[in-house]
Amino acid sequence: MAESEVYSLSVVRAEELDPKFKYKMSRIPGAERLMLCYQCGTCTADCPISRFSDFYRPRRIARMVQLGLKDRLLSDSALWLCSTCFTCVDHCPQGVEIAGIVRALRNLAVTEKGTIPLVQKELATSLLKTGYALILTGKYEFPRSKLKQRETLGLPPLPKPNLSDLEKIFEVTGASKAIEKAETFEQVKS
Ligand code: SF4
Ligand code: SF4
């Protein structure tokens, strides 16, 4: 299915709808209030990613979950555009946590569909190995300007990560195996 078709709701086929999906999602922490979304559009109006994207719309993600368009959602690379800034969560009049819904969908994309953007896999691998998603040297370098800013503000150096605790969390949650097995794809641009 073409990307625009994945994300468009202009044609929805009955066989695509999974009526149980919204109940499954509602049991996941962070996505509990998804059925309270009444499509006011505040989240989309305030989302910084939507401002620069022709197709990323948090309001539409909430509707797609309610409709049960599970396969479209999980195969949609736009899902990974959300920056988890939580603006939508702060502004939703119904207390729906779109950021939590997106996080739950991403987890399902990795664990059930077995796919993850290459950049996310590399960041997760870095986190597991070094304790930081952004590292001090290499491809995803922590901005030197930020380190300088910490010094200027009198903040202590970055804390030392507890790698054994991190390893346990990755192991217990199954994240290590799921991320290792997942196939990668190039992240779509907004
Ligand atoms: S702001 Fe809340 S109620 Fe309005 S569309 Fe977004 S999620 Fe739904
Ligand atoms: S958390 Fe994601 S969906 Fe919500 S406003 Fe921020 S970028 Fe948009």
Image (spheres, grey):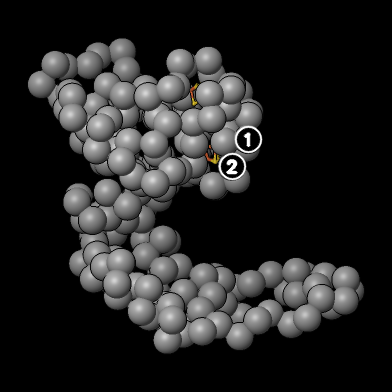
Q: Which residue is mark 2?
A: 86
At 36% from the left and 79% from the top, the residue drawn is 168
Q: Quadrant of residue 129?
A: bottom left
Up the image or down, 151 lies above or below 74; here it is below
Q: Secondary structure at mark 1?
A: helix
Q: Amino acid at mark 2?
A: Phe
Q: Residues within 10 Å of mark 2 (few under 14, many from 20)?
A: some
Relative side of 181 to 79, left or right: left
Residue 42: x, y in percent? 59, 21
Residue nearest the viewer, comparing 106 with 120: 106
Q: Which mark is residue 11?
A: none
At 40% from the left and 39% from the top, the residue drawn is 31
Quick check: can you spot residue 124? yes
Relative side of 189 to 63, left or right: right
Q: Which mark is residue 90?
A: 1
At 77% from the left and 70% from the top, the residue drawn is 145
Q: Amino acid at mark 1?
A: Asp
Q: Secondary structure at mark 2?
A: loop
